[in-house]
Image (cartoon, grey):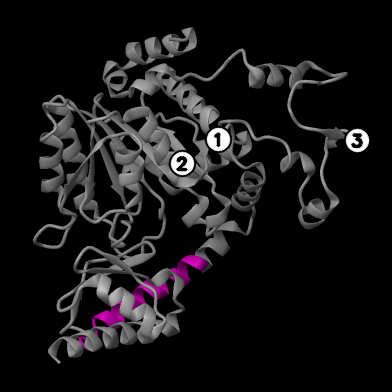
């Protein structure tokens, strides 16, 4: 084991032995090189005033070399802000700006100690980092039965973890905190669990209410008090898109300092929040009362990034930084929020009309991009294919009965027509079945 990895491990073990026990085998071995090319280049950048012959980029006339055909399309930006490598942890100004944004949007964070957000290649990469650092073969990853399919690829296929499912909704169609608690307590013999909390939920568009949020925190705390080390991951991909009386803050803040056996990890990003899906800019943030522990986790995270991406896209980070620090940012974001809320409200209005009650119900939704129908009379995959072939309508089939509809990409005036077409598709299949 490299001495730098040993030193980081010793720090984590000293500051919180429970967090050390959460680390995967690769996490215990990983470190960020202090004496390699990046560190020597950083030192040279600060001190080599005459010639800096360290980093693998090309310079011309004192700025990064570039092609005019590219720069002509990016003339609003200085070459230094788009062509150079970004640091492995991300552009420092962006990290600081995102941290400020987090506190502004979640005031409860101001009273807690948490790391500077580390830039990831969007949220999937952030979750992949969580998987690498905390998931080993046989570890349990607890997610609801209605979930984003990429969790299985990230945690189970890549790392060999075992997926543990619980019903998202209880009999009252609220968040099933009791089932979450039971799933956590069932891991007592293993002594460890990774719990992924994704709100607004993909695929249902559901965010728990404030009281449900307290129940979730209580469930995790009960698991910790039973001796289970819990990596509590808040997948906040759709953060801020809260349209009704749900929680309007991430559970990340509520989980800070709850118990030494709970490590809160926040994965979020500009991808969905700021409608820049192709930019691939996300963040991973850790919470702990110990700044030394946070520093060690940051070094381990940078080691994972160095070993995979090396660093994220510099232009994308510059674009996001300019956007979130612009005076017009909040007003423009509110404008888009209002459009999204209008689409969600129109979707609910259409579904509550009663005209489709014979063929489906729908799962509660109040946020995000999506909602899910629960079909009564036909199979979801059969309907999906029929809608695509006969009506040119694309939907997502999930299991036998659930059909995901992304109202986010449908203009408000077209939502009623969309559901009329889906209804027609169901009726086509029903009629065909009776012939």
What's the residue at 61%, 12% (across, down)? 35
Relative to 72, say whether 100 is above or below: above
Q: Which residue is mark 2?
A: 125
Which sits earlier in the primary sequence, circle 3 or circle 2? Answer: 3
Pinpoint residue 305: horizontal percent, then vertical percent: 52, 31
Of helix, strand and loop, which one carries label 1? loop
Of helix, strand and loop, which one carries label 3? loop
Q: CA distance from mark 2 to mark 1?
A: 10 Å
Q: CA distance from mark 3 to mark 1?
A: 29 Å
Q: Which residue is mark 3?
A: 61
Left or right: 332 with respect to 197? right
Which sits earlier in the primary sequence, circle 3 or circle 1? Answer: 3
| Residue positioned most to the right | 61
The one of 21 and 107 positioned closer to us in this rendering: 21
Q: CA distance from mark 3 to mark 2?
A: 36 Å
Q: Main secondary structure of the magenta part?
A: helix
**How many residues crowd around disc 3 within 10 Å: few (fewer than 14), some, or many (20 or more)?**
few
Q: Which residue is mark 1?
A: 309
Which sits earlier in the primary sequence, circle 2 or circle 1? Answer: 2
Q: Give the residues in magenta.
A: 336-355
Q: Quadrant of the N terminus?
A: top left
Give residue 264's quadrant in the image.
top left
Q: Quadrant of the C terminus?
A: bottom left
> Is 321 in the magenta?
no
């Amino acid at each position: 084991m490299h001495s730098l990895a040993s030193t980081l491990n010793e720090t984590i073990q000293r500051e919180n032995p429970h967090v050390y026990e959460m680390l995967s085998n690769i996490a215990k071995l990983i470190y960020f090189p202090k004496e390699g090319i990046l560190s020597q280049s950083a030192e040279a950048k600060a001190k080599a005033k005459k010639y800096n012959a360290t980093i693998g980029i090309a310079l011309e006339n004192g700025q990064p070399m570039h092609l005019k055909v590219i720069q002509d399309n990016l003339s609003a930006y200085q070459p230094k802000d788009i062509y150079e490598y970004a640091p492995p942890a991300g552009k420092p100004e962006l990290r600081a700006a995102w941290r400020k944004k987090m506190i502004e949007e979640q005031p409860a964070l101001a009273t807690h100690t948490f790391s500077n957000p580390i830039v990831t290649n969007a949220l999937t990469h952030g979750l992949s980092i969580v998987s690498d650092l905390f998931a080993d073969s046989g570890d349990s990853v607890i997610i609801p039965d209605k979930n984003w399919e990429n969790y299985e690829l990230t945690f189970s296929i890549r790392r060999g973890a075992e997926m543990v499912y619980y019903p998202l909704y209880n009999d009252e169609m609220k968040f099933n905190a009791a089932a979450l608690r039971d799933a956590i307590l069932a891991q007592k013999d293993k002594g460890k669990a990774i719990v992924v909390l994704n709100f607004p939920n993909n695929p249902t568009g559901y965010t728990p209410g404030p009281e449900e949020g307290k129940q979730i925190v209580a469930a995790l705390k009960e698991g910790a008090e039973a001796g289970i080390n819990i990596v509590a991951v808040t997948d906040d991909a759709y953060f801020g898109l809260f349209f009704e009386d749900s929680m309007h803050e991430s559970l990340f803040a509520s989980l800070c300092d709850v118990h030494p056996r709970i490590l809160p990890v926040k994965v979020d990003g500009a991808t969905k929040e700021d409608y820049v899906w192709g930019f691939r800019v996300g963040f991973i943030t850790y919470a702990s009362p110990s700044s030394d522990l946070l520093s060690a986790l940051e070094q381990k995270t940078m080691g994972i990034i160095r070993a995979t991406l090396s660093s994220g896209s510099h232009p994308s980070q510059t674009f996001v930084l300019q956007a979130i620090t612009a005076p017009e940012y909040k007003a423009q974001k509110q404008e888009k929020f209002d459009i999204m809320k209008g689409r969600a409200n129109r979707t609910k209005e259409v579904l509550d009309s009663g005209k489709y009650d014979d063929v489906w119900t729908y799962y509660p939704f109040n946020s995000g991009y999506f909602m899910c129908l629960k079909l009564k009379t036909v199979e979801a995959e059969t309907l999906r294919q029929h809608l695509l072939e006969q009506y040119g309508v694309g939907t997502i089939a999930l299991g036998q009965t659930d059909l995901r509809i992304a109202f986010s990409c449908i203009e408000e005036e077209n939502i009623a027509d969309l559901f009329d077409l889906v209804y027609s598709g169901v009726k086509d299949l029903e009629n065909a079945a009776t012939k």
